Image (cartoon, rainbow, N blue to C red):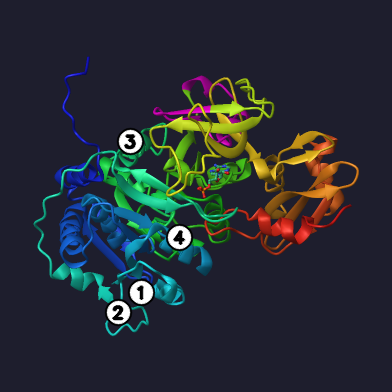
Amino acid sequence: MEGLMMNYPLTTNTILEYGNRVFHHKKIITYLPDGTRHEYTFGAMYHRCKKLANALTNKLDINKGDMVGTFAWNHGPHVELYYGVPGIGAICHTINIRLSSHQTEYIINHSEDKVIFVDATLVPLLEKIAPLLETVEHYVLINSPANFKTTLPNTLNYEDLLAEQSENFEWPLLDENDASGMCYTSGTTGLPKGALYSHRATYLHAATIISPNAANFCSQDTALLIVPQFHVMAWGFPYLCLMSGTNMVMPSSNLQPEALIKILEKEKINKANGVPSIWMGIYQAMKKNPPTEKLTLQEYLVGGSALPASLIEAFEKDFGIKGIHAWGMTETSPLGTACRLQSKHEQLSYSEKLKIRAKQGISFPGLELRVIKEDGSLAARDGKSMGELHIKGAWVISSYFKTNNQENFTDDGWFKTGDVCTIDQDGYMEITDRTKDLIKSGGEWISSVALESALMSHPKIREAAVIAVPNKKWAERPLAAIVVADNQDKPSVDNLIEFLSKDFAKYQVPTNYVFISEVPKTSVGKFDKKVLRKQFAEGKLK
Ligand code: AMP
């Protein structure tokens, strides 16, 4: 028997309409690439979304199911695209501005973008590949100064485009399972793959992430959205801000630690997100030049790569700001877990609590996790049994865009993440590695993430990345690539071995160390171990 409830499609339009109806006075503040500040309300943004919908339909000939690319920083117009494009049934395809020209060309041709909305400051990146783009009919320039010159063909100006449109537009009735957005993986192995999000997944992800167990957003908050809109829909934050009435502050390209600290101070931000390297940079800058007044920032949500316990502790002890660890993937919309303590943890010591807080956390309602061991059996939830993390749920992809390749999916309906982890009796998941980054030495697994986290708590170390290097006797041994902290001398190898020996078994402790000026990073700021392996591991048998 079917329930007798209304069929009310969960779409981005319902989020936009709600945000305008209930929180129209809330603000979107943008720091533009030239440093100028722009402020408007959710209500004003709503009217511009309607103008955009008219422009897409009447001027740019965008229809239901068409791909609309964005190549832009975090700012108000990009939020308008997050709503205006799916609002008419088209797909908002956010293109990562940090990929190589070859990958960008591949992604645009593969997705068949009909129009690309591009920031003026990023135009040179597209000019290089424009002759190779097969489906793009128009480029719409955002934030472009008067007399801006470009070799891109068929350009329009975003503001002019909106100015000539009416604010009256009736959203078409959409099915909640229609596609709303798309993001390609960052392609660290092979070509990038498209994750095609639906309205329903986007809605459910945002509604769930608002909760106090996750991002913990409400209408008294002001959030700084550092995670780029060009990567996994900025973790869905532009959607959850409208749902929760949280003021949104967008930094565009002002991503240097000093610039971000200024914005945190000026806008009285209390919540923020970002990858660990951003927060490491902010911490170091604050240490060097402590703010004159205590920041209003209460907590920052971190994911993308592991948040070291040492950074959580240092930020909290020095500045009273809490780091909240989270995990996710492009394929999971992206957030899958977040780590907050529960009442049962209250009696634990600070270091015991810290140990839990450095885990990636518990999953959200609407998702399920399991860990599958090397022999194919289910790992026990004991915090020790390690295996590959599988996930399923309402905002996990069921296949990649335009491919029949199902190698990442199991026959019983799970997505294989490629992450290696444990889950403890309370459901707290801890990533120990990517499957391809694990080190197997003399038949025993060694976690590169655990070693990195420990090394980064050493006072003389800023960054540490650990990779496997071939070894005649043990098959593989760990090698640690170390970046020395500012104004510190190089720690000795003996000192590092002694430091690690406190927490690791002898076979786990690296004896190979190299000192480098910076750990190479991927387009989204993660350690790029592929580059390190090329540099230090390939062809060398020790
Ligand atoms: P992406 O699709 O680019 O967002 O990358 C997803 C991958 O990033 C995951 O499969 C993990 O390997 C890694 N990742 C994300 N969050 C974390 C985290 N909190 N700790 C460790 N690795 C993470």
Q: Can the viewer see residue 100?
A: no
How many marks overall?
A: 4
Label at residue 120:
1
Q: Is residue 244 left or right of residue 300?
A: left
- Looking at the picture, does residue 486 appear above or below residue 367? below
Decide which of tag 3 and tag 1 comes sooner along the chain.
1
**Does the CB distance between marks 3 and 1 fall below 8 Å?**
no
Label at residue 392:
none
Q: Residues within 10 Å of mark 2 (few under 14, many from 20)?
A: few
Q: Quadrant of the N terminus?
A: top left
Q: Position of residue 151 (x, y in %)?
A: 37, 82
Decide which of tag 4 and tag 1 comes sooner along the chain.
4
Q: CA distance from mark 2 to mark 4?
A: 28 Å
Question: Residue at horizontal 20%, vertical 18%?
Answer: 3
Q: CA distance from mark 2 to mark 3?
A: 38 Å
Q: Position of residue 283 (x, y in %)?
A: 55, 54
Label at residue 145:
2
Say which quarter of the image contains residue 354: top right
Q: CA distance from mark 4 to mark 1?
A: 20 Å
Does residue 365 show up magenta in the picture? yes
Numbered disc in front, either 2 or 3: 3
Secondary structure under the numbered disc 3 in the rendered image: helix
**Does the CB distance between marks 1 and 2 fall below 8 Å?**
yes
The residue that disc 4 covers is: 107
Looking at the picture, tell me which residue is in the foreground, 196 or 264.
Answer: 196
**Does the CB distance between marks 4 and 3 fall below 8 Å?**
no
Q: CA distance from mark 3 to mark 1?
A: 33 Å
Decide which of tag 4 and tag 3 comes sooner along the chain.
4
The residue that disc 3 covers is: 204
Question: Which region of the structure is painted magenta?
Answer: 343-369
Question: Residue at horizontal 78%, vertical 55%?
Answer: 537
